[in-house]
Image (tube, helix red, strand yellow):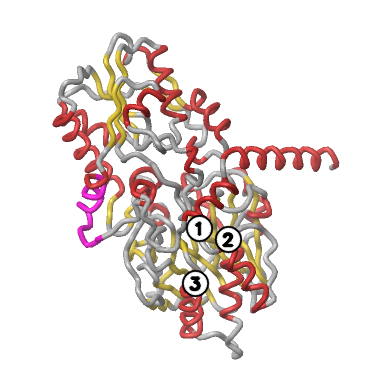
Amino acid sequence: MCGVVGIVGRSSVNQAIYDALTVLQHRGQDAAGIVTIDEENHFKLRKSNGLVKDVFLEHHMQRLQGNMGIGHVRYPTAGSPSVSEAQPFYVNSPYGITLAHNGNLTNTDDLREAIFKSAKRHVNTTSDSEVLLNILASELDKFPDYPLTADNIFTAVSAVHKIIKGAYACVSMIIGHGLVAFRDPNGIRPLVLGRRALADNQFEYIVASESVALDILDFEFMRDIAPGEAVYITEDGQLFTRQCAEYPKYSPCIFEYVYFARPDSLMNGVSVYQSRIHMGQMLGRKIAREWAHLDIDVVIPIPETSCDAALEIARILNKPYRQGFVKNRYIGRTFIMPGQVARRQSVRRKLNANRIEFEGKNVLLIDDSIVRGTTSEEILEMVRSVGAKKVYLASAAPEVRHPNVYGIDMPSVNELIAYDRNVDEIAKKIGADALIFQDLDDLITAVKMSNPNIEHFDCSVFDGIYVTNDITQQYLDDLDARRNDKKKTRQAQREAENLEIYNEGQ
């Protein structure tokens, strides 16, 4: 689950892209990158592993000059965590093209072989984003005249839609032309468009994963980029848009609203904050209806994605709402840490229980979701260690029983605690006295309240229905073999060893 941003301005955009990436940091903590185009039509690129604040130092920012640029924060779901796979990627032909991508392609292996045979293009990494870039470049290379027209670019994006499958929200730049952004025909991953008026009645434009990036830069939110739509913004600020997919259909990822997106973002016409309020209302009514026998003294959220839902649950149950955990804000989000060991070790460093809110009480904990169960198990042990009598746990999302193939790091079904277990077995596994999950229909209703026009969501992690209609059991088995936690842990260890060897040699 990565974050992307692209800006076409009238002055240097390096600081604006940096600022946008800092508020998209929650979407990826593995790596960050910025590329700009300078006055001499050269790409200026800086990317590395790490947080935005650590990757870009003052001398990097001074070098990233230009009135147009794109940025990326990476959360690895495909490829390796190597710095060579940080984004944006670029190719020199045709013209010079760079691209950053949020999502995951589901036919990468076939594409890699096809572009080598048909276009003689070599992909140097295991990243599906580099594959996507080369396919776009290959399609643009079919137009012999210079410069490319908007029609040429939209024709190329239309061809890309027909070739690739999966989830993708992309920002790209073409030397001598401008910025191109496009979204997959199902609109699985988010992408928004904004503008900022200048004194001469001209506009600067921005595209980003979430509207919060527009807010902090004082860009006006225009709209979501539609599923299958492409946007082309020329170097001099002309805006062109076109629907480039034959059969676009809104099927946004519902897990964006459960966990990933910031509460102050607006995506697909839905306020993330408001959707979480509605999740709490739906879950609170279920608890009041079906779990009235529980003797609950206090409602406490597991910070911080669940706080808005927990407040509504407490109101509906007429129970006290308390902040029982103190969060260390300098620890990354445990869900997107690579490897089970890193996630487990970080929980105690990330949260500390305030004994006075737990000792001698029957506590209802609220979490946004339960995926691997690692965090839940550790938190419940912590709560009991400070004197809680009974510990109940409610999840604002249903049981996660299926792997995700569209850019969320849930690839191995055997790592999901709900896989092949019923609710009582999950409760016993994590040590809960009672365990309550949101119903899927209620979750969908909660999100749709803000935008009833969305008829369908990608809920594949809950129901196993993949909206691209191309996912087979063989694909899931292969994915599981390539990307389970044990392999990622070994991969991370090798990266650390290689870095240590490199540093010793310097």
Reading the image, the residue beneath label 3 is: 180
Query: Which class describes the residues within 10 Å of circle 3: few (<14), some (14-19), or many (20+)?
Result: many
Identity, as a three-letter code, of the amino acid under mark 1: Asn
Tell me the residue at 50%/47% (across/down).
411
Q: Give the range drawn in magenta.
A: 443-455
Q: Earlier in the sequence, mark 1 or mark 2?
A: 1
**Is residue 208 located in the magenta-colored stretch of the structure?**
no
Query: What is the distance, in whole Å, between disc 2 and disc 3 at their CAs?
Result: 18 Å
In the rendered image, residue 467, in percent from the top left (x then y), is placed at 37, 60
Query: What is the distance, in whole Å, between disc 1 and disc 2 at their CAs?
Result: 7 Å
In the rendered image, residue 39, in percent from the top left (x then y), is placed at 63, 72
In the image: residue 126, left or right of residue 201: right
**Is residue 448 located in the magenta-colored stretch of the structure?**
yes
Q: Residue 496 or 44: which is nearer the viewer?
A: 496
Secondary structure of the residue carrying numbered label 3 = strand
Identity, as a three-letter code, of the amino acid under mark 2: Asp
| Camera-nearest label, 1 or 3 | 1
Query: Which quadrant does the C terminus fall into?
Result: top right
